[in-house]
Image (spheres, rainbow, N blue to C red):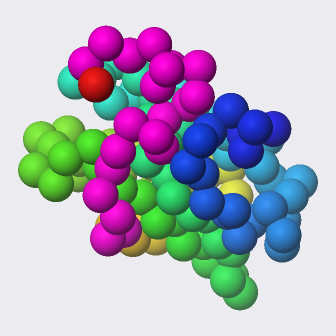
């Protein structure tokens, strides 16, 4: 399960409401890579929450830097992929958290030479 390999992963609301969707979302969203970092948005911990409210989904996402040149395209790819998996309209909300290495997959953050 994702919570065991991420240091600073919040409890996604979808775990409480639609746990059956989690594996499909993880698999699908793991295909979206940050081109500058060469890691997926899941490995980097950029997806901070996924919530299904009524007939739509809300995904809270952050970027590794506020001015990431690939940010808008990664966020749109995330929205499109999640919408196709969940089969309901999906909106991306840009979170107000600042990304830090502790949000990365634990196996990657311990061995990452940049920090």
User: Could you say where residue 104 lies in the image, as x and y percent from the top left?
Assistant: 48, 35
Asked if residue 101 lies in the magenta stretch, the reply is yes
The quarter of the displayed image where residue 74 is located: top left
Asked if residue 105 lies in the magenta stretch, the reply is yes
Residue 104 lies left or right of residue 68; in this view the side is: right
User: Could you say where residue 26 lies in the image, as x and y percent from the top left?
Assistant: 67, 39
Q: Residue furthest bottom?
A: 54
Q: In which quadrant will I find the N terminus?
A: top right
- Check the image and report above or below for 18 versus 72: below
Q: Which residues are magenta?
A: 95-114
The residue drawn where x is 53% and y is 37% is 42
Viewer can see residue 54: yes
Numbered marks: total: 0
The quarter of the displayed image where residue 33 is located: top left
Q: In which quadrant will I find the C terminus?
A: top left
Residue in the foreground of this view, choosing between 2 and 76: 2
- Check the image and report above or below for 26 versus 88: above
């Amino acid at each position: 399960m994702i919570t065991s390999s991420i240091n600073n992963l919040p409890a996604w609301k979808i775990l409480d409401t639609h746990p059956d969707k989690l594996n499909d979302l993880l698999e699908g969203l793991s295909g979206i890579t940050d081109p500058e970092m060469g890691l997926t948005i899941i490995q980097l911990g950029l997806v901070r929450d996924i919530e299904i409210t009524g007939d739509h989904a809300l995904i809270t996402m952050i970027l590794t830097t506020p001015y990431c040149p690939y940010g808008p395209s990664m966020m749109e790819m995330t929205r499109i992929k999640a919408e196709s998996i969940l089969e309901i309209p999906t909106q991306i909300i840009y979170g107000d958290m600042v990304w830090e290495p502790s949000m990365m997959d634990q196996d990657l953050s311990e061995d990452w030479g940049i920090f």
